[in-house]
Amino acid sequence: MNQQTLNEVCNWFDDYVNRYCQGNGRLHPMLQLKFDHSLRVAVDSRKIASALGWPDKDVRTAEAIGILHDVGRFPQFAKFGTFFDTDSVNHGKYGYGVAGESKVLASCSPKKREVILNGIRYHNCRVIPTELKPESLRFLKLIRDADKLDIFYVLSDAIRNKRFVEHPELLLNANPEGPANPKLLQEIREQRSGSYKNIDSLIDMNLLQVTWVYGINYSPTFRCIAERRLLEGIRAVMPNDPEIQEVITAAREFVTDKLSA
Ligand SMILES: [Fe+2]
């Protein structure tokens, strides 16, 4: 992607988001959060792609996917008033439709268009579809990494600034004071992953997030996790329970091993 096309994508996204402003000219705080998230994910996408040594045109494509990956969130929230995909729509699939039907990728080649649309479509799926072409997979893995990196930030910011008091949906309506769910701990011990159905508390949210390190694809992302001390930040707000601490320690060791590999 050339710089002009990337500029067009940025301008399109600004106009698109502005359509969701309320009467006071501002976005709903939850949509503002998604807007800010998209911009940060774009920056991280660029950063990871550059660190991987990808050519400039690919770095720009990665940035464009970062900007566009959550376009489905805006109509999802406007129509359904929630970010719960299970109660509304799959926002990846929805965003794929939005971007595909718009003019945002009009200057892209059909190949590039497919790569970007697949990035949007599958950024949030639980397992990466193996039937995708290598070019799509390469970019999809990157957007998934950049997205996870920023969600670490969004969650820790929500905890630090108690944003969930006003917006409980930030915690998927989990109980901010509740204990760890033993079913989730067991799931993590057995599979190094957890399911949303076992999230009851803020502690569970943090535990689930810790397991995300096992789904990271690229080494620069591991470096960001270590440099930003994301796991240490989670440890600092977690109870001193050996079972919980063990989950964090195992994830930390996994990141360290990846960095020294
Ligand atoms: Fe998303």
Image: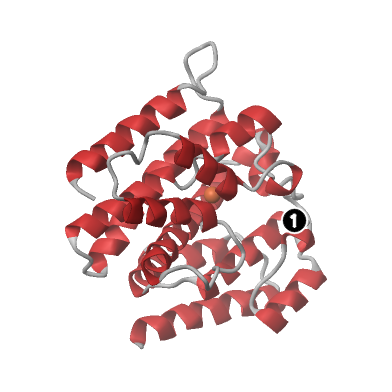
Cβ at disc 1 under 8 Å from ligand 1: no
Residue that label 1 marks: 201
Toward the bottom, the furthest residue is 261
**Residue type, numbered disc 1:** Ser
Look at the image and tell me whether residue 33 can be seen: yes
Q: Is residue 145 left or right of residue 1?
A: right
Residue 83 in the image, given as x and y percentages of width and height: 65, 41
Q: Is residue 161 above or below residue 219?
A: above
Vertical placement of 105 versus 214: above or below? above
Please name the residue shown 25% across and 57% down the image: 59
Q: Position of residue 140 (x, y in %)?
A: 44, 62
Tell me which colouring the rendered structure shows: secondary structure
Residue 217 place in picture, x, y as percent: 43, 72
- Mark 1, residues whose alpha carbon is within 10 Å: few (<14), some, or many (≥20)? many
Q: At x 34% / y 51%, what residue is drawn?
A: 110
Q: Which residue is located at x 38 percent, y 72 percent?
A: 218
Q: Is residue 225 left or right of residue 57?
A: right
x 26%, y 70%: residue: 52
The answer to which of 257 and 99 lies nearer the viewer is: 99
Q: Quadrant of the C terminus?
A: bottom left
**Which is more toward the observer, 55 or 242?**
55
- In the image, residue 68 lies at what x, y percent? 42, 44
> Can see residue 238?
no
Q: How many marks?
A: 1
The front one of 178 and 14 is 14
Considering every residue shown, the one lying at the far top of the view is 23
The secondary structure type at the circle numbered 1 is loop
Corner quadrant of residue 196: bottom right
Q: Is residue 206 left or right of residue 52?
A: right
In front: 124, or 22?
Answer: 124
Left or right, residue 148 beside residue 176:
left
